[in-house]
Image (cartoon, rainbow, N blue to C red):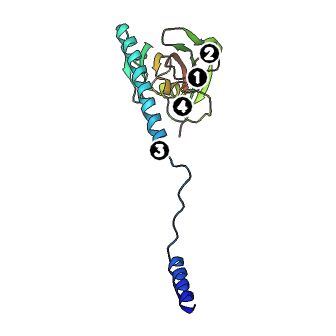
């Protein structure tokens, strides 16, 4: 009986000395959602870029430029004299419209009205493409921008007006720049 007691005691001690095992998660994810999302966004951009490229090729009289921010534009009215372009903190007054790439008006210049904007400091609901585009302009210039959806309204679109992931064009007229002296 004593031997049985010692055998059980040794077995219990040996079993209790085992290091604790980490609990495994009930559900494991491999990060494929992020990878799939990135691939989906690349395909959307490639498709939109092809559409915009075909529009630019069909309109050879316009001298299209490519921005560092990932959109295309051309000058309707260009100021070759002035050197002043808006910088962070400058106040600008401008008008703009939103059109589909085929030219159908989504939001007219009249609907938008005259806009007052402090460059990169106003919490105004402007799409990133227009915020970036304003920095490329001089007072008195009118520029037409072609924005892929990620620089426009992206996944959200405009309720009852513009669907998700739709590239757009916008004609912007920069009326004035009020520089901020430091």
Tag 3 secondary structure: loop
Q: CA distance from mark 3 to mark 4?
A: 47 Å
Task: State whether residue 42 is above or below residue 172.
Answer: below
**Image point 64% across, 16% down: which residue?**
160
Q: In x, y percent, where is residue 175?
A: 55, 18
Tag 4 secondary structure: loop
Reading the chain from its start, which is encountered first: label 4 or label 1? 1
Q: Hey, which residue is sitting farthest bottom in the picture? A: 2
Along the viewing direction, whichever of 145 and 177 lies nearer the viewer: 145
| Residue that badge 1 annotates | 157
**Image point 61% across, 33% down: which residue?**
122
Eye-nearest disc, 3 or 2: 3
Eye-nearest disc, 4 or 1: 1
Q: CA distance from mark 3 to mark 1?
A: 27 Å
| Residue that badge 3 annotates | 31
Mark 4 closeness class: few <14, some 14–19, many ≥20 residues within 10 Å? some
Tag 4 near tag 1, CB within 8 Å? no
Using the rendered image of the protein, determine whether residue 134 is visible from the camera's viewpoint: no
Which numbered disc covers residue 141?
none
Mark 3 closeness class: few <14, some 14–19, many ≥20 residues within 10 Å? few
Q: CA distance from mark 3 to mark 2?
A: 34 Å
Q: In x, y percent, where is residue 98?
A: 55, 16
Q: CA distance from mark 2 to mark 4?
A: 35 Å
Task: State whether residue 76 is above or below residue 69.
Answer: above
| Residue that badge 4 annotates | 179
């Amino acid at each position: 009986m004593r031997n049985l007691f010692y055998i059980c005691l040794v077995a219990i001690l040996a079993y209790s000395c085992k290091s604790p095992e980490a609990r495994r998660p009930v559900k494991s994810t491999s990060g494929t959602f992020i990878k799939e999302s990135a691939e989906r966004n690349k395909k959307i951009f490639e498709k939109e870029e092809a559409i915009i490229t075909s529009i630019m090729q069909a309109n050879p009289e316009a001298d299209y430029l490519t921005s560092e921010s990932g959109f295309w534009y051309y000058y309707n009215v260009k100021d070759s004299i002035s050197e002043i372009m808006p910088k962070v903190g400058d106040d600008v007054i401008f008008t703009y419209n939103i059109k589909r790439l085929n030219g159908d008006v989504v939001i007219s210049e009249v609907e938008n009205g005259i806009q007052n904007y402090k460059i990169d400091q106003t919490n105004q609901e402007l799409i990133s493409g227009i915020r970036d585009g304003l920095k490329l302009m001089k007072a008195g210039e009118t520029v037409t921008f072609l924005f892929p959806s990620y620089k426009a309204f992206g996944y959200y679109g405009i309720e009852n007006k513009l669907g998700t992931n739709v590239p757009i064009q916008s004609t912007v007229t920069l009326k004035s720049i009020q520089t901020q002296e430091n």
